[in-house]
Amino acid sequence: MESLTIIESKDELVTKLKEEIEKRSKQAIKERKQFSIGLSGGSLVQYIGEVIPRLITDLEKWKIFFCDERFVEESNQDSTYGCYKRILLDGQTSLKEEQFIKINTKLSLDDSARDYEERILREFNCSVDHVPKFDLLVLGMGPDGHTCSLFPEHNLLKEHNRLIAAIDDSPKPPLQRITMTLSLINNASCCCFVITGESKAMAIKQVFSKSLDISYPVQLIKPINGDLIWILDTAAAKFLK
């Protein structure tokens, strides 16, 4: 199922995102006693930071992963985990640090990517020939249509063997990152895009034109057996009718 919601205000966006996360969290915990969620960084951090403390769900049964991560120490302002740690592990929620499955920056970039993939497989009790199925991935998009650290015309868009990959030539700093690949993303039960700002409007116009011309990585996000949810503000949706 694919759905689109255009929101008018930040409060409305937070409310909509809360509804989606709360619903899927409760369902996963009821069915499997655990909720697996992948988070993205950037502007999404502020929204997630407002949503999670308001949720009515059992946070102790959450496992939190990262859809991509900058290869920097968590004390660095570019660290996605570091950003979430500062707003979610400060006593505002009952989340614990051990619930966050994060990269190991003590390893080399490539070894860190392999290690992160292995840790995800262990958390899901999956063998190497099975693809884990996340309950929810919360994704963003850049003005160039990139999502996670999958950039236009980059070789990683053709990666089909790895679930987690390293990138050392990111068009956007920092250069070194670790990202989920399309194989892992598209196996999720739900991919939820939260996209705001007029700078994203042209890419959104292309995405919803249903054109066969694939210009943006975000157009390649098509969950195999899952839902695709779009939450846009009016600025990002300005060219949609």
Image (spheres, grey):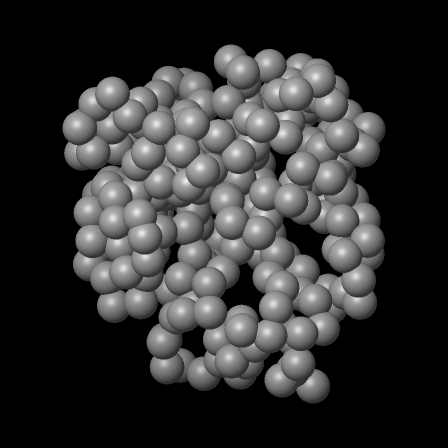
Q: Is residue 3 visible?
A: no
Residue 136: quarter of image: top right
Quadrant for the C terminus in the image: bottom right
Q: Is residue 50 visible?
A: yes
Total labels: the figure holds 0
Q: What residue do we see at 76% from left, 43% from top?
A: 18
Q: What residue do we see at 32% from left, 52% from top?
A: 173
Q: What residue do we see at 72% from left, 73% from top?
A: 234
Residue 23: quarter of image: top right
Question: Picture coordinates of residue 49 (x, y %)?
Answer: 67, 37
Q: Nearer the viewer, residue 148 or 70?
A: 70
Quadrant for the N terminus in the image: bottom right
Question: Picture coordinates of residue 130 (x, y %)?
Answer: 33, 32
Question: Picture coordinates of residue 118 (x, y %)?
Answer: 29, 23
Q: What residue do we see at 35% from left, 21% from top?
A: 119
- Work out whether 115 lies above or below 54: above
Left or right side of 158 for 204:
right
Left or right side of 222 for 48:
right
Question: Picture coordinates of residue 181 (x, y %)?
Answer: 33, 47
Left or right side of 208 for 52:
right
Left or right side of 141 for 29:
right
Q: Nearer the viewer, residue 76 or 139?
A: 76
